[in-house]
Image (cartoon, rainbow, N blue to C red):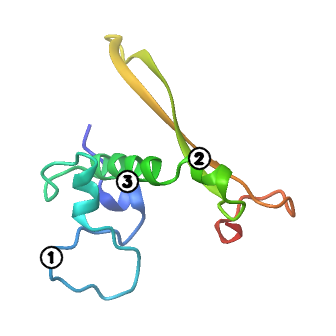
Amino acid sequence: MAELTLSEVFGTGSTKVASGETVSESGLFIPDSVLSAVGLDSLSTATADAHATAILLVLESNLTQEAFDADIDKSIYAERCFTQFISRGTERTPYRFDFITFNIAKLDFGAILNPNDY
């Protein structure tokens, strides 16, 4: 099965931008140096899954429960959970599953999850 594309993981229009290149619309930019700091190698050829994993590791590092607990204005923190080993596929190939949980908190004014509330 083929690797997911950047657009399939991050949404339509997502693309890798080369250094010095300009883009036609505004948006979030994460420098390669941030992703390489958490271990992503070969940034120009890394898969979309590898980029997503690096972003999750950056978030885990920067959004700590300690900072959340110390500041009432913080609304999100990440924490590493247990590792599990699960067999997949018809051959029952063993896979390692690593879990990172993201916890988000807001005043209880509604029952929907809306990113504008955080």
Give the numbered dot on residue 66. Answer: 2
How far across and down, in percent of the image, does residue 103 sit?
Answer: 64, 47
Decide: few, some or many residues near mark 2? Use Cα within 10 Å; few <14, some 14-19, many ≥20: few
Give the numbered dot on residue 55. Answer: 3
- Lower sequence index among marks 2 and 1: 1
The quadrant of the picture occupied by the C terminus is bottom right
Q: Amino acid at mark 2?
A: Glu
- Determine whether, in the image, residue 12 is placed left or right of residue 49: right
Q: Amino acid at mark 3?
A: Ile
Give the numbered dot on residue 19. Answer: 1
Judge depth for marks 2 and 1 and give the one in front: 2
Q: Amino acid at mark 1?
A: Ser
Q: Secondary structure at mark 2?
A: helix
Q: Secondary structure at mark 1?
A: loop
Decide: few, some or many residues near mark 3? Use Cα within 10 Å; few <14, some 14-19, many ≥20: some
How far across and down, in percent of the image, does residue 7 sit?
Answer: 35, 62
| Residue at 53%, 39% in the rendered image | 79
| Residue at 69%, 65% in the rendered image | 73
